[in-house]
Amino acid sequence: MAARAEQITVVLADDHNVIRAGLRGLLEAEADLRVIGEAADSAAAARLVEDRRPRVLVLDLQMPGAAPRTDIPPLRERAAGTAIVVLTMQNDPRGARDLLRAGAGAYVLKQAAERQLVEAIRIVADGGSYVDPELGGALAKLEADPLQALSERD
């Protein structure tokens, strides 16, 4: 990897202390990544993002007070320069599609290899998008078949 002119700043949002500690250790082992804040709920994550303006927010889907499909658009408005990496246990192509459409830059499964999270952070920090390879094929099928875009209710 080529050296970056500046570090990628990251805020971690997960309600489990041990997960945040593990993520911090993983990310800070990378010379170009620096964790500048941690939050245990979505309200604290929003405040940190607004106050510290990280390049990337790593956001767990299942935290107290979290409603990612509705939380992401206002976060993107208040901190337009912050890319969002959704980190989740939910292997759900429709959910991934909805969150990416809402403004998330990446959707990474918690069971993914550590390198995938690091790669996703770097990609979204540079303006790209990333979908966990395990979901890629299913997501492509959703996009190719217009009927797949319909919800059960539709």
Image (cartoon, grey):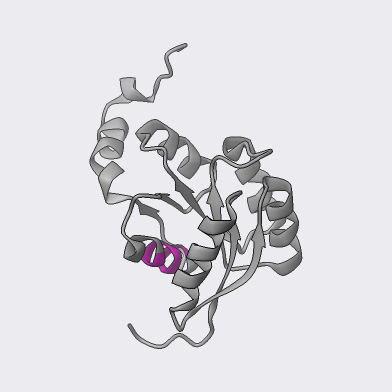
* Quadrant assignment, res 11: bottom right
The location of residue 5, given as percent across then percent down, is 50, 88
Looking at this view, is 35 or 69 the one in front? Answer: 35
In this picture, residue 81 sits left or right of residue 94: right
The answer, for residue 84, to whether it is visible in the render is no
Asked whether residue 115 is in view, the answer is yes
Q: Position of residue 24 (x, y in %)?
A: 53, 68
User: Residue 34: horizontal and vertical position, in percent?
Assistant: 55, 76
Q: Is residue 84 left or right of residue 65?
A: left
Residue at 38% across, 25% down: 149
Residue 143 horizontal/vertical position (percent): 31, 34
- As displayed, is residue 54 above or below residue 5? above
Residue 90, quarter of the rendered image: top left
Look at 46% across and 44% down and name the residue there.
100
- Considering every residue shown, the one lying at the far top of the view is 153
What residue is drawn where x is 36% and y is 37%?
91
State whether residue 89 is above or below residue 55.
above
| Front position in the image: 103 or 58 | 58
> Looking at the image, which residue is at 36% across and 66% down?
119
Q: Is residue 151 magenta?
A: no
Is residue 71 positioned above or below 152 on the image?
below
Quadrant location, the C terminus? top left
- If the image is split into quadrants, where does the N terminus sit? bottom left
Dominant secondary structure (helix, strand or loop) of the stretch shown in magenta: helix
Q: Which residues are magenta?
A: 118-124
Number of numbered callouts drawn: 0
Picture quadrant of residue 37: bottom right
Give the left or right position of residue 57, taking residue 120 as reference.
Answer: right
